[in-house]
Amino acid sequence: MITTLLIITFIIGFIIIRLSRMAKNGQNKTSLNNQRKNSDSQLKFIDIDHQLPRRNFALCPLELNGGGGQVGKTTTTKKLVIIFGWLFAQDRHLDKYRKLYLDLGFDVLTIRTDLIQLLFPTFGSQIMMLKLIEFIRKNQNQYNQYIVHAFSVGVYVMGESLVLMKQNRNKDVRDILRKQWKGVIIDSAVDVNEGPIGLAKATTTNFLLQILIIILIRFYYIINYPLATRHYLESSRQIHINPYNCPSLAFISKDDPMVNHDDHIKTFEKHRNNGLIAIVKSWNQSQHVAHYLKYPDEYRSILIKFLDNVM
């Protein structure tokens, strides 16, 4: 039974990945040039894990990038923002957020999860989060304030870290974050129920392909509950209960089909009723993970005000 389930799971996963690659290639007729352009960043990085490519896990230090006018200054402790990118996020888009935080005096750790790592969390997204936990453990004397900024499916990946930190072996990191995790910013969060729609729309603009991908993923949810779906649900639960009582800020829009707008409003209202800082900025019209692009001044102003309030 388990063997059959594994075979079916890998077949469906393979089909989804192939459809994704076909759609992305169809959208980019000059894909090679675009990939080169998108993989370029003007910022300087440190590769912190030789087992993971920079695309997945990379540190952008303040002192190497001149942010905040602090080049040449040495400090015993620093601020770190952990950015969880959206699916297929490109460096040229993420750099806007990296530069924003560098200007505010943060080191920037960017985590991006590939499609196959999302489909098979036990050897994908969970492995990534174990790497993150180990990074925090090794650098506990380097940083004394943490901020998380998660986009779209990156919010799910962040939730996996919350699940893993419940384990006894990670109690030391859990204790660190209870004191030093100052706030979380959620941008266009895609929950498990909206996941198939989000993945389909992130993959292709072809309506028929979108429908096919949605059907395949929902079927994948059903047959792959033990290996994947239960992890998606537990991640979502941890995000909703906010186990660290962390101040939170959400950027959403009413016309984003990938986001459950009402769920955001209700969840954040519950946190406020529990005495937590929980702010929702909702626009009537704004594309998925493009709020900063459309409303740069307002986005930045709200973000900075939130950070000033929690740090």
Image: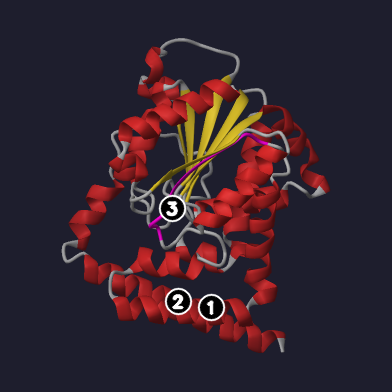
Q: Position of residue 217 (x, y in %)?
A: 50, 76
Query: Which residue is disc 2 drawn over?
Result: 214
Label ID, residue 86? 3
**Front in this rendered view, residue 22 or 256:** 256
Residue positioned 73% across, 44% down in the render: 243
Q: Can residue 156 be seen in this snapshot?
A: no
Q: Secondary structure at mark 2?
A: helix
Q: Are marks 1 and 2 in contact (CB under 8 Å)?
A: yes
Compared with residue 17, is residue 173 higher up or lower down, i.e. above or below? above
Q: Secondary structure at mark 1?
A: helix
**Front in this rendered view, residue 182 or 171:** 182
- As measured in the structure, the alpha-carbon distance from the residue carrying label 2 to the one carrying label 3 is 18 Å
Query: Which residue is disc 1 drawn over?
Result: 218
Q: Can residue 19 be seen in this snapshot?
A: yes
> Considering only order in the chain, which callout, 1 or 3, is on the residue closer to the N terminus?
3
Compared with residue 140, is residue 117 higher up or lower down, i.e. above or below? below
**Front in this rendered view, residue 233 or 135:** 233
Q: Is residue 247 magenta?
A: yes
Residue positioned 64% across, 54% down in the render: 160
Residue sitting at the far top: 73
Q: Position of residue 71 (x, y in %)?
A: 40, 14
Q: Which residues are magenta?
A: 246-256
Indicate the amino acid at tag 1: Arg
